[in-house]
Image (spheres, rainbow, N blue to C red):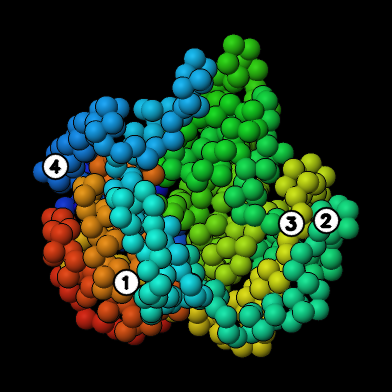
Amino acid sequence: MTESEGNKNEDCHAANGVKPGRNGMVKNHHHHHQYQKQEKVYHAACNGELYSRPFIESFEETPMLVAVLTYMGYGILTIFGYLRDFMREWKIEKCHIAREREEQKDFVPLYQDFENFYTRNLYMRIRDSWNRPICSVPGATFDLAERSSNDYNWTFEYTGRVVKDVINLGSYNYLGFAENTGACATAAGEVTVKLGVGVASTRQEMGNLDRHEELEKLAASFLGVESAMAFGMGFATNSMNIPAIAGKGCLILSDELNHASLVLGARLSGSTIRVFKHNNMQSLEKLLRDAIVHGQPRTHRPWKKILILVEGIYSMEGSIIRLPEVIALKKKYKAYLYLDEAHSIGALGPNGRGVVEYFGLDPKDVDVMMGTFTKSFGAAGGYIGGRKDLIDYLRNHSHSAVYATSMSLPVVEQIITSMKCIMGKDGTTIGRSRIQRLAENTVYFRRRLREMGFIIYGNNDSPVVPMMLYMPAKIGAFGREMLKRNIGVVVVGFPATPIIESRARFCISAAHTKEMLDRALDVISEVGDLLQLKYSRHKVLPSLDRPFDETTYEENE
């Protein structure tokens, strides 16, 4: 098992007689209950100045046999895919794919055959595992409209039956605010009746309401920054604001596993982009050092700006950014830091203030704090927080601010009400209890999966829990078998993940009760035995359950 803690410093590794493994992390083949003491000593020796708590992430390497069988599976699927394409070409098999008209054959092709090969022959066969239509609130459970296909998932028909009370392990409903009852739903309903749904204008014209300004002041207070700005779409918060911050003559250093919105924003900016290995501080520092020493290509002039793009929690890996080390490097090389807290805001930290609070850091050390309201707040849109002069600049230069319609007022009210609940400004401890319950559920769910023998990726405190499936045939099989047992899960495969690292991704919520998690875990274990998914070679002995309290959160054990 690959276990990492604290600063990945080569001198520290050498002193401990251990070589860095995947992503520069340390390979350790002890059982979980055996290496606790060793990790604490290592942490104290190497990272007392940067980390105030243990930092434990696991990325067990793919077993060799599993990797070989996975490649063989994709190879067989590819061969049969070409065979089916041949049969379609000769009209032996009916062709459902979009094709060029005969009179357009001499033009540049609109549909690239090779690019759509995976979609035609692999994705379509398991397409029923995605885009499932739900017909209820996506809370701890949901109702699902049943559908069937008579042409191998090219088209679907609704059967008219509704599958009731499916346990939801797929939605980003971390704090359980995606609900149709309670204070948030009531407040949003009242605002809808009073002010309507649409704003029909941009913020710079007639779409700037007092509720928008209240939301931004509240968000700035919650984040601990001078000012904040809200946007109507989370994806556009990244893709439209990064081009306003960086441009030609700037250098962007991006984590290799950054979200598509960050990647798109970096490309649209026109900046030079260099990618560092995921969460690998040696790789990042090398790029920073080279950028300072060599400057821009050809001219060797200094870069106008060096911007580091990272995420708080990586939604496919379940890993948490090594923020103390990133900030240390940022200060050392005089770079700027852009932190995307889409998945970490509300889900990490004793008060839900994200990865900055999780590590006990100063928000002022992060130049651009970005996040979304779509997950922990159960709403829509995103925000950017930072210094007042930065936010004032974005109000006038961001395409998402100047040209986009203002955020819908019921959505604004949902965010305000949920944020006040998290901060305790509603006069209750509901928000605090939800944050603690999420942390408790996360630790419990991850520990139980490891005890069962599954390979789990990510940080012990991350509510995003990737469970490795590997083989292509098991992607669809796992999703279908879980749904048969009334558990809704998200399965992910190539090209969203590396070709041999297909996985199921569970998202834990504060709305989940222990009975729900136990039911889901029993089903996962049953399906895991059926599909032979318990790949881990490092079995963890079951431990006694104990009540969750503040010390549990702090120990991270």
Residue 308 versus residue 48 in the image, above or below: above
Seen from this angle, which residue lies furthest top? 298
User: Of the numbered discs in the image, which one, if any, rests on residue 422?
Assistant: none
Q: Real-space Cα distance between discs 3 and 1?
A: 38 Å
Which sits earlier in the primary sequence, circle 3 or circle 4? 4
Give me the C-alpha separation between circle 3 and circle 4. Answer: 49 Å
User: What residue is at 26 percent from the left and 37 percent from the top?
Assistant: 93
Relative height, residue 472 to residue 186 (above, below): above
Provide the secondary structure element on which disc 1 rests. Answer: strand
Q: Which residue type does callout 2 highlight?
A: Ser
Q: Nearer the viewer, mark 1 or mark 4?
A: 1
- At numbered mark 2, what does the secondary structure look like: helix, strand or loop? loop
Residue picked out by circle 1:
487
Q: Position of residue 236 (x, y in %)?
A: 64, 48
C-alpha distance separating marks 3 and 2: 17 Å
10 Å neighbourhood of mark 3: few (<14), some, or many (≥20)?
A: many
Identify the residue under disc 2.
201
- Tell me the crowding category of disc 2: few under 14, some 14 to 19, or many 20 or more residues within 10 angstroms, Cα based: some
Q: Secondary structure at mark 3?
A: strand
Q: As drawn, is 43 to the left or to the right of 394?
A: left
Give, as a three-letter code, the residue at label 4.
Answer: Leu
Question: Residue tagged by mark 4?
Answer: 69
Residue 492 located left or right of residue 358: left
- Amino acid tagged 1: Ile
- 217 vs 320: above or below: below
The one nearer the camera, 203 or 273, is 203
Q: Which residue lies under the disc numbered 3?
A: 229
Residue 93 vs residue 331: left or right? left
Q: Quadrant of residue 88?
A: top left
Residue in the foreground of this view, choosing between 86 and 550: 86
